[in-house]
């Protein structure tokens, strides 16, 4: 799964679910369903991902930690799917539900993850003050818990928000070294997101724009990142390039987005054979 070998992951997951069903391990079955929804999402089978995620949210009703984890996963995935439909208020609502379930499960780090997701959607909706307040709260909580990863995530979200808010130089202070760290770790999905913000920031300051757009295009074509603030950054980037008369670069960014919009349309239109699921 993390190595992006999705077909092999599906095979192992199907085998694991069959074993769990035979053993009567309902919780493990729900965990498998959650991973199935994730795989469907990343393989552009969006109608199937939505059906699975909704089934988890509606059907996994236990109050034990494992059941709550499964429901959080379902809500999170439904939020991601709403982003692809450009239904940001709905995405914000689902991230809010995911946060509530994470709070009930007693896992503070998961609460912080969902708070940052809410902050990014708010920023993409131009509700900057609310987004900033949430991000600041996460940073304070992460520091209090001595959660170094959480602190880094909060700083990363700040840089992404800075880029979208037009503070390109400030954004690059964090993003430039962060890109190299993420590249060294081989996290292609996160790298795509960061490169979108870098390209937008560079377009704002007018330095290294063509190289930044070229690197973003290669990364996005290989591993697209389609969360709310990344897509907002790419739309803003195309508009800024157009305004600056850099029409070829603007068309290139627009083409990346339009190609994915077609994939989204097809993915949501696919029928799901629920009888075999």
Image: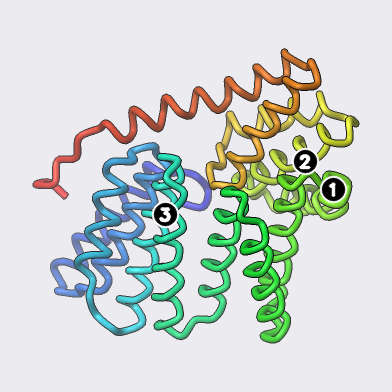
Q: Which residue is mark 1?
A: 172
Which residue appears at 57% of the width and 72% of the height?
112
Is residue 209 rendered to the left or right of residue 266?
right
Name the one closer to the observer, 205 or 174: 205
Mark 2 or mark 1: name the one nearer the start of the chain. 1
Question: Helix, strand or loop at disc 3?
Answer: helix
Under circle 2, the secondary element is: helix
Alpha-carbon distance for marks 1 and 3? 28 Å
Q: For residue 238, which quarter of the picture?
A: top right
Q: Residue at x 55, y 60 (%)?
A: 117
First along the sequence among labels 1 and 3: 3
Position of residue 263 relative to residue 113, above or below, is above
Callouts 2 and 1 close, C-beta under 8 Å: yes
In the rendered image, residue 161, in percent from the top left (x then y), is placed at 71, 53
Q: Which residue is mark 3?
A: 79
Against 71, residue 156 (above or below) is above
Cα separation between marks 3 and 2: 25 Å
Numbered badge on residue 90 = none
Relative to 24, 242 lies left or right: right
Q: Residues within 10 Å of mark 2 (few under 14, many from 20)?
A: many
Percent from the top left, x then y, of residue 149?
68, 70
Task: Give the SS element for disc 1.
Answer: helix
Q: Earlier in the sequence, mark 3 or mark 2?
A: 3
């Amino acid at each position: 799964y993390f190595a992006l070998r999705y077909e092999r992951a599906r095979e192992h997951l199907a085998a694991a679910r069959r074993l769990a069903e035979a053993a009567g391990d309902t919780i493990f079955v729900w965990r498998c369903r959650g991973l199935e929804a994730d795989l469907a999402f990343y393989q552009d089978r969006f109608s199937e991902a939505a059906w699975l995620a909704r089934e988890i949210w509606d059907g996994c009703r236990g109050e034990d930690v494992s059941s709550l984890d499964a429901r959080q996963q379902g809500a999170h995935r439904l939020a991601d799917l709403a982003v692809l439909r450009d239904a940001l208020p709905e995405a914000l609502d689902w991230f809010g539900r995911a946060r509530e379930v994470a709070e009930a499960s007693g896992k503070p780090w998961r609460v912080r993850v969902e708070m940052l997701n809410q902050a990014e959607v708010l920023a993409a909706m131009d509700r900057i003050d609310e987004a900033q307040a949430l991000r600041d709260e996460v940073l304070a909580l992460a520091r209090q818990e001595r959660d170094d990863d959480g602190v880094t995530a909060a700083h990363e979200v700040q840089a992404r928000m800075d880029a979208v808010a037009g503070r390109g130089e400030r954004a690059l202070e964090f993003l430039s070294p962060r890109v190299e760290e993420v590249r060294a770790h081989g996290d292609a999905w996160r790298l795509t997101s960061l490169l979108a913000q870098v390209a937008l920031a560079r377009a704002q300051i007018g330095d290294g724009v063509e190289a930044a757009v070229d690197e973003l295009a290669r990364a996005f074509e290989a591993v697209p990142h389609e969360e709310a603030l990344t897509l907002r950054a790419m739309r803003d980037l195309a508009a800024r390039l157009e305004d600056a008369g850099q029409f070829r670069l603007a068309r290139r960014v627009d083409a990346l987005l339009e190609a994915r919009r077609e994939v989204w349309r097809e993915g949501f239109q696919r029928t799901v054979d629920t009888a075999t699921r």
